[in-house]
Image (cartoon, grey):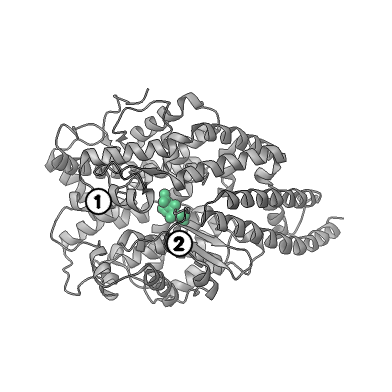
Amino acid sequence: STAQEELLAKEFLLTHDQTSSEMCYQSNIAEWRYSSDITDENQRLKLEQSLVSASFERLAWKNITSFNWEPFTDLDLKRKFRLLSVLGPAALKEDKLTQYRKAIDAMEKIYSTAKICSFTNPGDCGLSLDPEITEKMSKSRNFDELKHIWVQWHGQSGGKMRSHYQNFVELSNKAAQMNNYSDTGAYWLRNYESETFQTDIEELWQTIKPFYQQLHAYVRAKLRAHYGEDKIPKNQPIPAHLLGNMWAQSWGNIEDLVLPYPGKTSIDVTPEMLKQGYTPKKMFEMSEEFFTSMGLLPTPPEFWSGSIIEKLPGKEMVCHASAWDFCNGKDFRIKQCTKVDMEDFITVHHEMGHIQYFLQYKHLPLVYREGANSGFHEAVGDTLALSVQTTKHLKEIGLLDKSAVQDEESTINYLLVTALDKIAFFPFAYIMDKWRWDVFDGSVTPDDYNCHWWKLREEYQGIRSPVTRSEIDFDPGAKYHIAANVEYIRYFVSFVIQFQFYKSLCMTAGQYDPHNSALPLHECDFYRNKEAGAKLAAMLAMGSSRPWPEAMRAVTGQDRMDASAFREYFKPLEVWLIAKNKELGEPIGWNSDGLNCQ
Ligand SMILES: C=C(C[SeH])C(=O)N1CCC[C@H]1C(=O)O
Ligand SMILES: [Zn+2]
């Protein structure tokens, strides 16, 4: 009977939980060893372990699916079986799985070890993405130097991945189909448990797009003032190499070129951090203190002994920041090639947000030790970072002078700088997966990979390659998440819901009152507020045990993604931008006629 079978199913899950935790630990150890020390031997061991894990997962999956779980009356048990009944890439036969893993490993290795030659010192060809290339993209204001760095990086990274990516797509789609999904895109979207998810994302984009275009127009006008009319003509997309970031995904690094009221307080406290002798360790300790000040959980000793928070000299390692859960309820780590600057101080909070989620749900069965959806996991740290970056908080921790003025103009400066990261990001995050959904569902074939990428870059971001591109190039591979096969729409979701979480926690902390102009949303700092901490902790402790609208309701009272908190936060800036663009006579939007890809 079903009742009997449900009892057996519960029994089975107890042992399954134990064995899958051990397997997860072994996999993570092998992956950690490789990504913190890229050698052939560590790569071989990582591949070997992934095959062992896959055979374990295949066996577990056979046991799971031997239960007739659909009619289960215990809905929690049924949810667990539904989640566990998707095997993933381990459905591939060993030889195909080996090819699949080798394709991804090759791309991640190319990305993480790529080097380029300096523009000013052509003999120096040892520049890595982290820190040299990133530093140059952020600081150089020389059009040709930026173009050199941009072209070289795209050639040395994505340019070497095309065949691997093509092979990966084929194998990944085959695995998706063996899991009864039409393609990898559909397989990825199961995480959001909603038939209307892609429509919801498009609708969110439609509400944000007008604001993005205002920001784009203003930034273009300011870039024209610096680089000249011939380089930045009106009505055209912005050249992709001038935004302070290799992928033009966040524009905060060109604050100096675009600040509306120069000379007023800037929240880029990097100089002060350096002056005060900040170290990566201190940045992590300060981040942890922010979490514990709200009554959230401290990191265990294993975190400090196991993490790698600076680039290891003399080694090749995956520098892209990441947070790791070793599935034993004790071992949690971050790997980050931390630089002492404001941008990395925010990233530290982003990664510590992942660790906090791991800590809050570590008591749950393994199947539920995930974010309510992947966007939730990306939103935790950013939500707290919105509080940390306020002038109020930066004064509190001594990174901003107490006498720093706060008036209309400094408010516009603050909101503009925040918008350079938070608004500019949306179209980038959208096309990162729009391009892949199109590739996975076959509507884009390999001989269209690169020009489809630039078509989307122009249409959504109003960004254009600084040099003519062709299908010899493979520019999507120049971004980590494409090379390492990490889904990206999670960040679009995060950038919407983090403002919903922030607004709600601010109201809980009494730091924001819509009817009191002395407590505007963007100045809210819930540092040390235990009620806000408790509310957030209650949601985090749910893991993925309930559909994400229920987790959302636990924090905000709403059960859907909603851009209105985001619009409310930036409202003063939106009004200012519209007026400013009129005053500058800067046309809004761009022609995407001269698509420079063929
Ligand atoms: C910091 C991480 C590790 Se989950 C990251 O990949 N992020 C954080 C923001 C967007 C995205 C990126 O760097 O592209
Ligand atoms: Zn993250």
> Looking at the rendering, in which quadrant would you find the N terminus?
bottom right
Front-lying residue, 376 or 300: 300
* N-term mark: 1 or 2: 1
Q: Nearer the viewer, residue 248 or 570?
A: 248
27 or 401: nearer the viewer = 27
Whether label 2 lies within 8 Å of ligand 1 gets the answer: yes
Q: Which mark is residue 154?
A: none
**Which residue is the site of mark 1?**
139
Residue 261 on image: x %, y %: 14, 56
Residue of label 2: 351
Residue flagged by tag 1: what amino acid is it?
Lys
For the C terminus, give its image quadrant.
Answer: top left
Look at 48% across and 68% down and name the residue there.
536
Tell me residue 239's x, y (percent). Answer: 27, 36
Q: Residue 362 at x, y = what percent?
A: 60, 68
Residue drawn 16% across the image and 31% down it: 230
* Residue 373 position (above or below residue 225): below
Left or right: 236 as drawn, with respect to 444:
left
